[in-house]
Amino acid sequence: MENAKPQDKSYLSIWFEAAFPRAWAVAESVSGLLGLIALSVTKNHPTWGTTMTDLGWQVPIGAFVLIFVYRAVTAPAEIYKAQRTTIDANEGVIHSLRDVLEGKRKNARLAELLGKKDEWAVHNLWAKIPKTAEEIASWKASEEVWRNEVGALMDEHGCPYLVKKSFLVLGNLLEGTPPGLLVLYHEDSDMNKELMMLNLRRKRLQEIIESYAG
């Protein structure tokens, strides 16, 4: 039969284990000490043998009773303290796990919302390359709104500043790039840079989404 686990023990058994063993250990120590004293005393005073014999069992019993009563009174407080410590530790673990799960839930939600923003950019910016000057102006305005909405979404969900910045300022990497090294998406050089910046921002956004979804 398996031994009972600590959490399966009744309060009475825990209380008894806290009170009895220490009282018994004191009684044993007192008994052993009196035995040594008795040998020395009876050797020098043989007539004290009966008295020492009586003391040999009376004193240990008395010590046992006193210690047991004391332990019986103080044991509940010690048991409560020990259990309270265990409960506090368990509550700390539960709170930590809850915080981790809540953090993962928030991260997953942010990844989902950013994913929708990226999907919008694919269908409304990348797939709708403007041709005329009017279309280009409208496209740039839409891209700016999209970019700001992504940044606001990151702020709302507590995204670190450097992560947000890495998304917003990627276009600056194109400054000073020789024309021959630029990928040709559009015949208009200014619009071509806009599309390249959009491509860079989308790639960075996808990296951010993966980091929060993982």
Image (tube, rainbow, N blue to C red):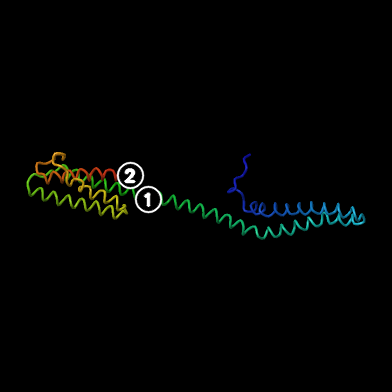
Would you say the residues marked 2 and 1 are in contact, meaning their CB atoms lie under 8 Å apart?
no
Disc ID at residue 103: 1
Q: Quadrant of the N terminus?
A: top right
Residue type at mark 1: give it. Answer: Gly
Find residue 208 and report its horizontal and vertical position in percent. Answer: 29, 45
Find residue 212 and report its horizontal and vertical position in percent. Answer: 33, 46
Residue type at mark 2: give it. Answer: Ala
Q: Quadrant of residue 211?
A: top left
Q: Quadrant of residue 56?
A: bottom right
For residue 119, side relative to residue 98 (left or right) = left
> Pointer 2: what residue?
213
Residue at 27%, 53% in the rendered image? 153
Disc 2 secondary structure class: helix
Q: Quadrant of the C terminus?
A: top left
Reading the chain from its start, which is encountered first: label 2 or label 1? 1
Find residue 81 and report its horizontal and vertical position in percent. Answer: 58, 57
Q: How many marks?
A: 2
Q: Residues within 10 Å of mark 1 (few under 14, many from 20)?
A: few
In the rendered image, the vertical position of residue 50 relative to residue 211, given as above or below? below
Residue at 53%, 54% in the rendered image? 87
Disc ID at residue 118: none
Residue at 55%, 55% in the rendered image? 85
C-alpha distance separating marks 2 and 1 = 11 Å
For residue 167, side relative to residue 11 (left or right) = left
Find residue 24 and report its horizontal and vertical position in percent. Answer: 73, 52
Q: Residue furthest right?
A: 47
Q: Quadrant of residue 183?
A: top left
Disc 1 secondary structure class: helix
